[in-house]
Image (spheres, helix red, strand yellow):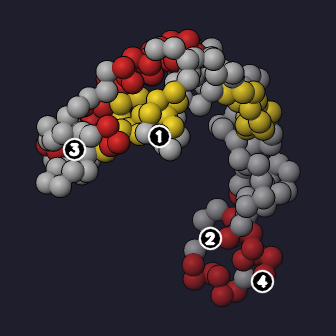
Amino acid sequence: MDSGLNQMYAIQRPVYAARAELTGPMTDSTPTTPPTHPPLDVAGLCNLKKSVIQNLPTTCGHCGAELPPRSIVEHNGAVIAYCKLKGACGRSQVLYAAVELKTPIYRQVCKFVRRPSTEGIVPGEMGRMNHAELMEMHDPSCATCGERMSQHKKSDQNGWTIVGYNPISYPSDWPFFDPSTGTWGSGSF
């Protein structure tokens, strides 16, 4: 990796580390329990975003060029600085890494198991196959439920899939960017 990419990742590493401290690690599923997600520290995330907004950089972390106020925006909840003045490096820098405020709802479904008859087919045999055999090779059916792979519910290694989400409410003072004015709004800072 070139030194520019190393520098870019080093500059943004603390941003993602701060987010990880407030979101916590997910635990893997087991055959009888879905993955679990720790509760989000929504107040901590709100305060982190406020702190970032209150301390916006005035220069690019990569090249040191000036960052005019309109070069820092919010995109899908993330706060990003774009270094786009003439002669500048043109890179972006994540200042606040967005977190989706929702928790997944899981359901256990059939775990796709490939039929043994479709394993090990060599391309030279394809000319002697009928339509059903070709279909089985390109879109195999599940040995457990018979459903084709293309239509089969996708799941983790233990058969758990996300079927919906429970939203988590934003605090009343959650900051957001208003692109029409180029300013930050919402609750108190």
From the viewer's perspective, is the residue at label 3 or at label 1 nearer?
1
- Rendered location of residue 20, percent (x, y): 45, 21
Position of 32 compared to 68: left or right? right
Which secondary structure, mark 2? loop
Which secondary structure, mark 1? loop
Q: Are marks 2 and 3 in contact (CB under 8 Å)?
A: no
Q: Which mark is residue 5?
A: 3
Q: Earlier in the sequence, mark 4 or mark 2?
A: 2
From the viewer's perspective, is the residue at label 3 or at label 4 nearer?
3
Foreground pick, 148 / 129:
148
Question: Residue sitting at 73 percent across and 37 percent down?
Answer: 162
* Disc 4: which residue: 130
Q: Which mark is residue 169?
A: none
* Disc 1: which residue: 181
Q: Earlier in the sequence, mark 1 or mark 4?
A: 4
Q: Earlier in the sequence, mark 2 or mark 3?
A: 3
Foreground pick, 34 / 54:
54
Q: Amino acid at mark 1?
A: Thr
Q: CA distance from mark 2 to mark 3?
A: 43 Å
* Disc 2: which residue: 121
Which secondary structure, mark 3? helix
From the viewer's perspective, is the residue at label 1 or at label 2 nearer?
1
Q: Amino acid at mark 3?
A: Leu
Question: Residue sitting at 36 percent across and 20 percent down?
Answer: 54
- Rendered location of residue 51, percent (x, y): 39, 17
Foreground pick, 28 / 185:
185
From the viewer's perspective, is the residue at label 1 or at label 4 nearer?
1
